[in-house]
Image (cartoon, grey):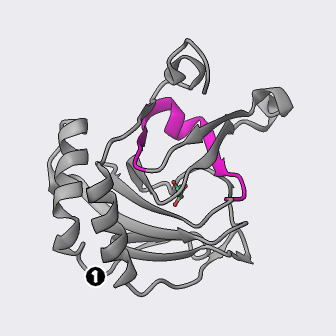
Amino acid sequence: MGTLFPIETFLPDGFSYSENFITLEEEDELIREIAEIELHGLLFQGFEAKRKVASFGYDWNFEKRALSKGKDIPPVFDSLLDKVAAKLDKAKNDFAELLVTEYPVGSVINWHRDAPPFDIIAGISLQSDCIFRLRPHGKIKQNRKSIISFPVKRRSLYIMEGIARTEWQHSIAPVKEVRYSITLRTLKT
Ligand SMILES: O=C(O)CCC(=O)C(=O)O
């Protein structure tokens, strides 16, 4: 961000960010595995989104507001799950969902809070950087100045929990290059 302060200084409690969380080789391998997965379109907030997804484990349908259990998380993601679990002091099996998302050039994810049944959200970015944005969930607190925008680099990890998860919304600005993300979610207990 070209500043002397760590990025966390500007971010709500519960949001943490680690650059270079995975190596170039790990990123290449994950992108190769994603290429083997069939991604599909989705409706988000009533509109056909430009991005494409594949969900494993539990999936939240935003339109039906329902959680369903799909295919198991493929073992090819085990080492990533282990790495993120270690960071969070959790076990690999605590991740109930693994979502793969492809963002074509110009696509976004609009303002939202993550689905209610999930607890901790961990996002790994692949292939290109993006501009990640946070704003308060409460409408009364929303204004231009309350938006926090910052770059999220490819190969980084962000974690949203606590207040960042419950009292803030997030979105991603139109991406300039194709981006993939892997989002891991634990379920609330
Ligand atoms: O691609 C990302 O990093 C964000 C994904 C996200 O916010 C979501 O799937 O709800």
* Residue 178 position in % (x across, y down): 58, 67
- Which residues lie in the magenta part? 155-175
Report the number of discs: 1
Say if 3 sits above or below 123 in the image.
above
Task: Report which quarter residue 151 is drawn in.
Answer: top right
- 166 magenta-colored: yes
Is 160 one of the magenta-colored residues? yes
Horizontal placement of 76 versus 119: left or right?
left
User: Which residue in the protein does label 1 denote?
Assistant: 71
Q: Secondary structure at mark 1?
A: loop
Residue sitting at 55 percent across and 25 percent down?
12
On whether ligand 1 comes within 8 Å of the CB at mark 1, the answer is: no
Looking at the picture, tell me which residue is in the foreground, 78 or 14.
Answer: 78
Q: Is residue 78 left or right of residue 171?
A: left
Q: Residue at x 42, y 69 (%)?
A: 100
Q: Position of residue 143 (x, y in %)?
A: 84, 32
As drawn, 19 above or below 145: below
Left or right side of 151 for 82: left
Which amino acid lies under the numbered mark 1 shown in the image of this protein?
Lys
Residue 189, given in percent of the width and then of the height, sits at 28, 48
In the image as oriented, which residue stretches furthest toward the front?
A: 24
How far from the left and from the top, in percent, is residue 161? 42, 37
Q: For the N terminus, which image quadrant?
A: top right
Depicted 165 relative to depicted 58: above or below:
above
